[in-house]
Amino acid sequence: MEPVESKDRQFVLSLDGPRWLAGFVADVPDRSGALAELARLAAGHGVNIHRLLYERGRHPSRVELTLECPESRRIGAVLDALNAKGMLSQAPEPEETPLAITDVSGVLSFKVALDDRPGALAALTERFKVMHASVIHLRYDGDAEPGMAEISVVTSGAEEVSKLLRELTGAGYHYHVLWQGGPDSSVDEVMGLSEVEAFLFKLRSSLPPERMSALEDLFSTSRAMRQALNEFRGASGESGEALAASQIYANILRLAAMAVGTTHERFTLRLTGPVRLTPVVSMYMLSCPEGANSYLLRHGDAATFLDTNFGIYFDDVMDWLALHGLDPSCVRTVLATHPDADHAGWAGKLQQRFGAEVFMHPDSAEVFRCEDRTLGHGDLCGINRPFTRLVSRLTDLVPPERISGFAPAQGEMGGFRVIGRIAVADLDFTVLESLGGHAAAQVFFLEEQRGYLFSGDYLLDPRSLSPKDRDALSVHKSLLTSTNTDSALFMREMGMLKELMRGVAANVAKNGRRAMVFPGHGEFYAVEKAEWGGARPGKQAEAPKQ
């Protein structure tokens, strides 16, 4: 039978042998006992619930239902009663999703055997109501798994969970516990948690209470953040590749949030340098706790930042520099390889605070405006859009108000288009445009005469990454595979860059110099020591010879 349309909802009414089936969506109040009321209403009319799916994490009020009964008039009476209670009107998406579950010790997931008859589900949910246990997930399907319901409830704590289990046992229910909350439990196993709750639970063991409070406040007051997290998880299941990529993205997202816990009194900075790049320019590599490399180029009374870190570290870095005799007000110029939050996070702040001129790919302004690191390109753009928003907001990215253009230049090098030049004292960088494999608006800064390449997230030396990076963040894997706009194109670009730098290394070697790669993560290194250059990469980067 064709679906019967209503103004707000779609009803599917069909006759299956001796029984009538009615499939539709209802909206129940977001409060304890609401599902019990719905089940009791159906049972009161002698109507069996054949299928029920409630997932609080997806929507706190929406219930998918299929009712069955030998007489269609009974189903009609149930629909009339639901309509009278306002449960058949299209409920708006919730404006606010309160973070109600803050303690996993009170969460229980289990499967329970039920008789396939009117009132069985009502009797069970009524017990939850009496025990003050709120259902956050309920799945019953008389076709896929007849006589078995999958349920998650939340109580006030572990003691109440134990009471509930004793109550079910005493009432003669046969059940199997799927998950019981505890300090060592994984929230990935819990159905019914909102994306925000699940995300914050994963951070609780890593962040101090005051930092957790700041994150909870951020998500509870920002609908955009909650929506972005839901979109991110929703897009993660669109394909196998997207789902695999989302696992790596989730790790990066978690570490971005953890950056909140490594600021101020918990802030540390690893400084490498000074390294003399030219008779005029000295370089310092700054590595913040959870971010990428930033390179400070000092030349006379001025300084240039090439790539900046997460915006949340800006004040700490500026204070640290000042305490160590490096006046941050002398930063006149910022160069950024690409507009990701861990490479351009405080570019706008340097411009606001010190009037620094910011040079980036011209498409960077659109990336910042759209908060989309792919600008809609690539198979994983559905994940990348909410991911960009989440990381940018969590790490306090401030886009520059003005992005300056590079000095004009044309041609190509190694298959990359030359889009400009920029000088930093006596360093003369050629600006090469990426083909777009990693992210939109990516450039590489090549100082051909001296053999220096600032490569962003290309040409990393995985062996130099810390165990924390490798195991928790999987930077070496994620930046070589699935955090890219187009991974196949990214790998092709990697090969092109290697060939380009082999040629550059051969040229500068004639003058006794070493070609160097300065990547966005891990240590910088000489091309001759790179694994892809033919020799095993060294553990410690060597300063370039002049």
Image (cartoon, rainbow, N blue to C red):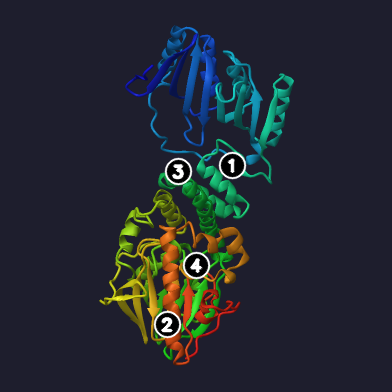
Left or right, 481 with respect to 373, comes to right
Q: Which residue is mark 1?
A: 102
Look at label 2 and name its amino acid.
Answer: Val
Q: Nearer the viewer, mark 4 or mark 2?
A: 2
x then y, percent, for residue 471: 61, 60
Look at label 3 and name its amino acid.
Answer: Glu
For the question of whether residue 281 can be seen, the reply is: no
Q: Nearer the viewer, mark 4 or mark 3?
A: 3
- Mark 4 crowdedness (10 Å alpha carbons): few <14, some 14-19, many ≥20: many
Do tag 4 and tag 3 residues touch (Cβ < 8 Å)?
no
Asked if 354 appears above or below 510 in the picture, the reply is above
* Viewer-proximal residue among 253 and 471: 471
User: Which circle's residue, 4 or 2, is located before the other in the chain?
Assistant: 4
Gap in Å between the C-alphas at discs 2 and 3?
Answer: 42 Å
- Could you say whether the residue bearing mark 3 is in a helix, strand or loop? loop
Q: Nearer the viewer, mark 4 or mark 1?
A: 4
Gap in Å between the C-alphas at discs 4 and 3?
Answer: 29 Å
Asked if 536 appears above or below 122 in the picture, the reply is below
Q: Quadrant of residue 505?
A: bottom left
Q: Nearer the viewer, mark 3 or mark 1?
A: 3
Gap in Å between the C-alphas at discs 4 and 2?
Answer: 25 Å
